[in-house]
């Protein structure tokens, strides 16, 4: 039988996303989430720790491109702007390519984010990254080396399965360039991101998962549910939340010959 991981990204990003993930996790409608350790509050981490189980895996949503670092500014000065905020994804990548990012500072912050989860009683089962930084050309392999050194053994494999928009095609190119750096990690064989470009629906779920199951036995579905939409974001969080909490998910998955599993199955 094929295996599907439904991973909710962005735990801690904001209250609507966090509450949606907690509700879905408690109901057993999703099987995994990844935490933005530099955004999540202590209370949100405690709430998640109470839900974490073999059937609800918790990982790190490595964030080096939004908000502030957990490390002291003096320890990661090459990663932040004059306001103490992380650079955007493109800015960070360009700075890395120009040699303006100190690799040790990357490791310092990655370690700080992993420690934040561990201190809350959350031993990360896996990692991915905000806006797929861990598979950007050159930068991605550097981050993957750091994650491996810090004990992370499972990571998301970006495949952008089923996406043919401009961003999807760029991400597919990024994924190909950085794929050799995934050696030594356990990864799902495909990533479904259908709901990143269209409102969640049974048809979209069936199409995306069926296509991924043709190429892999273990598949990850990337999700961004929320109780409200986030201003300025192209993601459609409320339709995702409504879809995942509905009754049709299990039936659809059975029809496709799959079962819901956590990252422990990778």
Image (spheres, grey):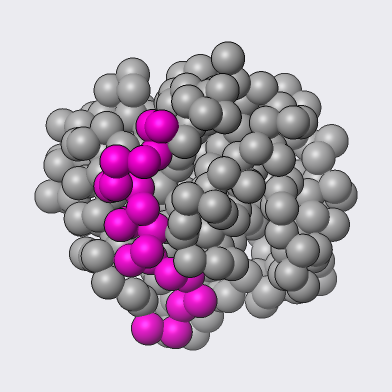
Please state which of residues 205 and 235 is positioned toward the viewer in this rendering.
Answer: 205
Residue 69 relative to residue 133: left or right = left
Q: Residue at x 53, y 59 (%)?
A: 195
Is residue 12 something that shows in the picture?
no
Please tell me whether residue 245 belongs to the stretch shown in magenta: yes
Q: Is residue 54 above or below residue 236?
A: above
Q: Residue at x 66, y 22 (%)?
A: 217
Residue 210 relative to residue 7: left or right = right
Q: Is residue 266 above or below residue 179?
A: above
Rendered-image quadrant of the C terminus:
top right
Rendered-image quadrant of the N terminus:
top right
State the image quarter where residue 33 is shown: top left
Report x, y in % for residue 131. Answer: 58, 61
Please tell me whether residue 80 belongs to the stretch shown in magenta: no
Residue 229 relative to residue 177: left or right = left
Report x, y in % for residue 229. Answer: 33, 75
Is residue 203 something that shows in the picture?
yes
Instruction: Tell me which segment is drawn in magenta.
Output: 231-251
State the image quarter where residue 211 is shown: top right
Report x, y in % for residue 185. Answer: 67, 26
Please state which of residues 80 and 180 is positioned toward the viewer in this rendering.
Answer: 180
Please state which of residues 232 and 102 is positioned toward the viewer in this rendering.
Answer: 232
What is the residue that sits farthest to the top in this orientation?
Answer: 1
Please state which of residues 106 and 255 is positioned toward the viewer in this rendering.
Answer: 255
Q: Residue at x 71, y 48 (%)?
A: 161
Q: Residue at x 16, y 31 (%)?
A: 50
Q: How many marks?
A: 0
């Amino acid at each position: 039988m094929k295996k599907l991981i439904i991973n909710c990204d962005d735990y801690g990003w904001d209250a609507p996303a966090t509450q949606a993930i907690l509700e879905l996790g408690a109901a057993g409608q999703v099987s995994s989430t990844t935490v933005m350790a530099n955004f999540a509050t202590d209370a949100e981490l405690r709430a998640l720790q109470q839900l974490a189980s073999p059937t609800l895996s918790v990982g790190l949503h490595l964030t080096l491109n939004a908000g502030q670092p957990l490390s002291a500014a003096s320890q990661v000065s090459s990663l932040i702007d004059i306001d103490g905020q992380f650079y955007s994804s493109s800015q960070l990548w360009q700075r890395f390519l120009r040699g303006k990012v100190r690799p040790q500072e990357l490791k310092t912050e990655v370690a700080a984010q992993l420690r934040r989860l561990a201190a809350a009683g959350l031993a990360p089962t896996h990692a991915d990254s905000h806006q797929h930084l861990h598979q950007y050309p050159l930068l991605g392999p550097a981050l993957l080396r750091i994650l491996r050194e810090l004990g992370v053994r499972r990571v998301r494999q970006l495949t952008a399965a089923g996406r043919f928009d401009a961003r999807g095609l760029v991400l597919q190119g990024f994924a190909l360039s950085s794929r050799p750096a995934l050696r030594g990690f356990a990864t799902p064989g495909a990533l479904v991101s259908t709901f990143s470009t269209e409102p969640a629906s049974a048809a979209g779920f069936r199409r995306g998962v069926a296509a991924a199951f043709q190429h892999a036995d273990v598949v990850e579905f990337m999700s961004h549910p929320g109780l409200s939409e986030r201003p300025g974001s192209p993601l459609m969080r409320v339709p995702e939340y409504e879809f995942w909490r509905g009754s049709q998910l299990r039936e659809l998955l059975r029809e496709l010959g799959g079962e819901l599993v956590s990252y422990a199955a990778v």
